């Protein structure tokens, strides 16, 4: 099952336009995230039916908290901010983290009404693993793009040399 998941993962993600995250790429990422979490948690159909609405609501609320932080932060550049502005940014960040922790506690309790505590713990691990894999794939993609770009530059330089030599 893990080998199948890995193959599906590689076939689905690598060809997508990762840097731009097109709607198709986002949809692929979302389906892979769902597949990975479902696989790691070994959700039964009954559990999945109850789990996903609760989990998706948690993600929306967490994203709203983060968007609120960004909106309240505004265009303040930490490098050019005054001492007062940076203190305000730190306080805002800590307040966000506190609210985010409260949200996670609340939803951990809600999720334990749907899945076991062992599965809730596996959920956190699956989320971390998914983020790690995505970062690795983005890194590989960037390295591949740089290698292709360097190769094109090298080929262009070789052509210029050949023209001068003739």
Image: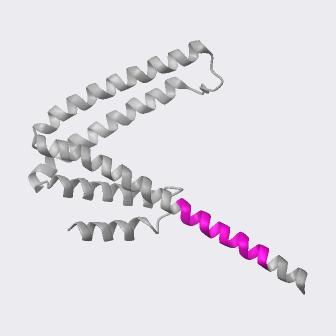
Quadrant for the C terminus, please: bottom right
Q: Does residue 166 appear left or right of residue 44 in this picture?
A: right
**Residue 141 located within the stretch drawn in magenta:** no
Using the image, determine if residue 15 lies above or below residue 135. Answer: below
Q: Does residue 2 appear left or right of residue 147 in this picture?
A: left
Taking the view exactly as shown, the residue that stands out farthest to the top is 84
Numbered marks: total: 0
Percent from the top left, x then y, of residue 127?
29, 47
Taking the view exactly as shown, the residue that stands out farthest to the bottom is 166
Depth check: 165 or 159 in front?
165
Classify residue 150 by image quadrant. Answer: bottom right
**Residue 145 located within the stretch drawn in magenta:** yes
Percent from the top left, x then y, of residue 163?
87, 82
Using the image, determine if residue 20 lies above or below residue 53. Answer: below
Magenta span main SS? helix
Q: Does residue 56 appear left or right of residue 153 in this picture?
A: left
* Colour logic: one colour
Classify residue 27 by image quadrant. Answer: bottom left
Residue stretch rendered in magenta on the structure: 142-158
Q: Can I make out residue 22 in this image? A: no
Q: Residue at x 66, y 24 (%)?
A: 80
Q: Residue at x 62, y 20 (%)?
A: 81
Depth check: 79 or 111 in front?
79
Percent from the top left, x then y, of residue 144?
55, 66
Using the image, determine if residue 159 lies above or below residue 1. Answer: below
Q: Residue at x 55, y 62 (%)?
A: 143
Classify residue 12 by image quadrant. Answer: bottom left
Percent from the top left, x then y, of residue 65?
38, 29
Q: Can I make out residue 93 in this image? A: yes
């Amino acid at each position: 099952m893990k080998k199948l998941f890995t193959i599906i993962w590689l076939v689905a993600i690598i060809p997508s336009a990762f840097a731009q995250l097109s709607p198709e790429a986002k949809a692929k990422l979302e389906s892979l995230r769902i597949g990975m979490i479902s696989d790691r948690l070994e959700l039964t159909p009954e559990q999945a039916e109850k789990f996903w609405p609760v989990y998706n609501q948690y993600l929306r609320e967490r994203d709203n908290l983060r968007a609120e932080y960004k909106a309240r932060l505004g265009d303040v550049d930490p490098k050019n901010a005054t001492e007062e502005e940076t203190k305000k940014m730190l306080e805002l960040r800590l307040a966000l983290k506190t609210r985010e922790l409260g949200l996670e506690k609340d939803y951990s309790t809600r999720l334990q009404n749907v899945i076991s505590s062992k599965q809730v713990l596996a959920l956190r691990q699956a989320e971390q693993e998914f983020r790690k894999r995505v970062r690795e794939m983005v890194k590989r993609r960037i390295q591949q793009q740089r290698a292709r770009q360097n190769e094109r530059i090298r080929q262009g330089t070789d052509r210029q040399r050949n023209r001068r030599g003739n």
